Image (cartoon, rainbow, N blue to C red):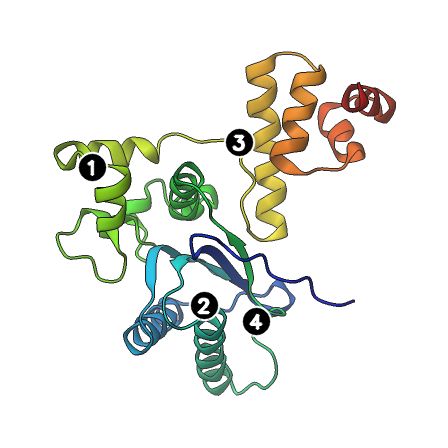
Amino acid sequence: MPRGKRIVSSTGIYHIMARGNNKEWIFHQEHDKGKLYNIIKEVKDQYPFTIFAYCIMNSHFHLLAKEESVSLHQIIKLINQRYAAYYNKNRHKIGHVFQDRYRSEPVEDDVYFLGLIRYIHMNPVEAGITQDPYQYKWCSYKEYFYETPLMVDSDYVKTNICPDRSQFRKNFINLHRGDDENLYLDTEESQERRKQKIVESVMKNFGVVNQASVRKLKESTGMTHREIAKQLGVSLNQVQKLLNT
């Protein structure tokens, strides 16, 4: 099957996710995550691009980044190649380390942008690794509290989205205590958990299965009619009637 053409972002900002081949853990230990972190930083120094958020999990990593003079396609390809070489050498393996090519989605507005920052930083919390993203070493949450961040461009958020510097810390923490009903790019397993969470949120807001709640689920998750029916515990025919009304 031919690969789908990547959607170009008008802002140059993309959410990028790459995961291990066959859904395997490729960041088994702390030094593996540290190696990827260092590779990203080295590539960024070599071919400057902007990072707004990152998170390195056990089986995959997320980047929220902006393309500059060199395409992000070239940059991510280089990052993955360097990590794959390290991984195979240290484990005496050959072959693919990452699953297919990396995945990406364009980021076109500030609301979605902020939601993504929260989502990426909350990955280790949702996975049950920690209760506070500040405690997770391999995500950029804590860098937003540094005067001089190590890798992220926190000034973009502080200047363009949260301009009141005196209230930034409070507002940034509160941002991560909230949530939305967007389905973000992630592993299949994480997206399934996210869909269930969105269903719970939508039904809590609407209270009943009606045209509005079913359409909201369709718009937010892109689930099939059959998936929505299963999640809501209603018939496929009922969902189809509501969506076609």
Mark 1 / mark 3, whichever is N-terminal? 1
Mark 4 / mark 1, whichever is N-terminal? 4
| Residue corresponding to mark 2 | 72
Q: Which is more toward the observer, 27 or 45?
A: 45
- Residue in the image at 17% along x and 31% along y: 167
Numbered disc in front, either 4 or 1? 1
Numbered disc in front, either 4 or 3? 3
Q: Which mark is residue 111?
A: none
Query: Quadrant where the N terminus lies?
Result: bottom right
Tag 4: amino acid: Phe
Under tag 2, what secondary structure?
A: helix
Tag 2: amino acid: Leu
| Residue corresponding to mark 4 | 98
Under tag 3, what secondary structure?
A: loop
| Residue corresponding to mark 3 | 181
Residue 36 horizontal/vertical position (percent): 39, 71
3D distance between C-alphas at marks 4 and 2: 17 Å
Callout 4 environment at 10 Å: few (<14), some (14 to 19), or many (20+)?
many
Q: Which mark is residue 163?
A: 1
3D distance between C-alphas at marks 4 and 1: 38 Å
Mark 2 / mark 3, whichever is N-terminal? 2
Mark 4 / mark 3, whichever is N-terminal? 4
Q: Which is more toward the observer, 12 or 169?
A: 12
- Residue in the image at 57% along x and 30% along y: 198
Under tag 4, what secondary structure?
A: loop
